[in-house]
Image (cartoon, grey):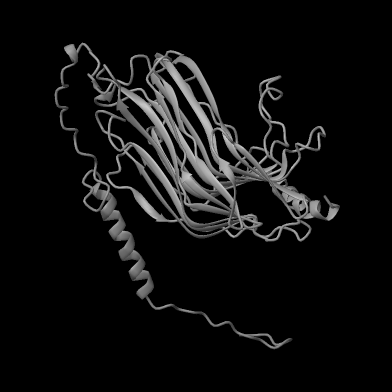
Amino acid sequence: MRRSLSVPLAGLLLALVAAPALAQPPTTPVPGPRDPNQPPASAPNGPQSLAHAVGDAGTGLSVVRLGPQGVPTNTILPGLSEQLPKQSVTEFGLGLASAQVNTEAFLSTERVVTQANPFGFAVAGRSPQSPGTLVQTAIPDNPQPTNGGLPIPETPLGKLKVLNGSVHARWDEKLGPCISPLATAKTSLAGLEILSALPAEVPLPSKSLVSIPDTFEANSNVRLVDLPGSKNKAVESTSTMRAVSVEIAGGIKIDVATPPTLTATATGDEKTSKITYTAPVLKVSQNGKELGTLDAAHPTLDIPLVLDLAVIKLQIAGLNEKKASFSGNGFSGFQLGATARMLDVQLLPTDKLKLPNLPTALAQISLGEQIVRAAAPQGGVVCGTAQPPQTPENPGGAAAPPKQKAPPLAYTNAAYQSIPLFWVGTGLLLAGVVLVAALPVRTSRSRVRAPGVSGP
């Protein structure tokens, strides 16, 4: 690679790194009382849902990575940075849809959160909140979704024509998350060009590396589903993609025969919790000639361009799963999650150079990035309502008697009756001001004497 190629990329990265104030700060812990015997900051009021459920699903239409796996992951835990996978130097995402459910959230407005982001970027794993995002939160409940167009960012990394979003967050006052639909988010676009302003030194026949001429849609959904053999529920997080075709520089066309679907289902038990993945089936051709099929059995395909000086690697990203038991917040259960990508397009991959500490490629474009996570307590999610706590004044948890009407507040306007003398004094003061203003003003004339003249 010529040195002139690295100049614009290095300038972009330095400009982004030079603004650390845009990075999100670490999450602030939930504040607690100074005195352990002090009651909490807030207490539940009225009937409370018995359901405990945590789940989220995220889907990105496209993610552009410059220098993938080129920066170590920073962490406050000693020795853990070497165990975590490396971050990209810079990431830029388009059309991001996320749905989150967390009944254990400290703030009630964070129990269900759905977002549709037009774009987002991260530098070494740190990402600010992008403007123009559609958001719906619950509590309170939202009977109808929020739909609208998302602002299209002007950037050489990606150009869009039309980008729409839809978000819907629900919550039942008595049953909590036991409502359908619960959390859904969607982004869809028509017309996309990625890396449309590559430097002239990049040996590609076209200045747009990837383009999607047809509709491209991402859906994220979290819901509660029936648990076989039980009246309780399971937490299900699902990420789906819908695409028709993808065009790549060099006359390469990819037809999406089967779109991917990624689902995490948590029942509270490791034996019945599962990850379900429908791998995509992509048919690849170049200038009308069939090159092969990308599927679970054939996940990679290398295509040389321009006298083998540039290589485009197509890859169906492998499925990564994580499972673990948990306990806390008064209950225990099982959680699991998974990530996958419909298609990875790598420009100038470095795996054949066999040099240490190199990014995996100059640039990597991920189409259809998916992530799902779900957690449920043992036995599943209980859809019911807790009775009010028992007190000496309210034995058995019965309904509390109606409260007596509070006495009226003191008057604070012109009808104030406690101190009538105040208004009398105010009236006399105003009358005095009027009288003084109406009296004629007498002025005295000073006499001017000549120097040396005496007498009257």
Residue at screen point 23% across, 13% down: 391
Q: In this view, which residue lies farthest toward the front? A: 289
Relative placement, left or right, of 113 versus 202 is left
Residue at screen point 27% across, 53% down: 423
Expressed as whole percent of the image width and height from the top left, the position of residue 34 reads 49, 19
Relative placement, left or right, of 118 versus 104 is right
Q: Is residue 168 above or below residue 204?
A: above
Let me know if residue 106 appears in the view. Answer: no
Expressed as whole percent of the image width and height from the top left, the position of residue 17 reads 71, 45
In which quadrant of the rendered view does residue 218 lie? top left
Expressed as whole percent of the image width and height from the top left, the position of residue 444 reads 52, 80
Relative placement, left or right, of 248 versus 179 is right
Let me know if residue 334 appears in the view. Answer: yes
Q: Nearer the viewer, residue 314 or 416?
A: 314
In which quadrant of the rendered view does residue 359 lie? top right
| Quadrant placement of the C terminus | bottom right
Q: Nearer the viewer, residue 79 or 427?
A: 79
Residue at screen point 82% across, 34% down: 355
Q: Is residue 227 above or below residue 358?
A: above
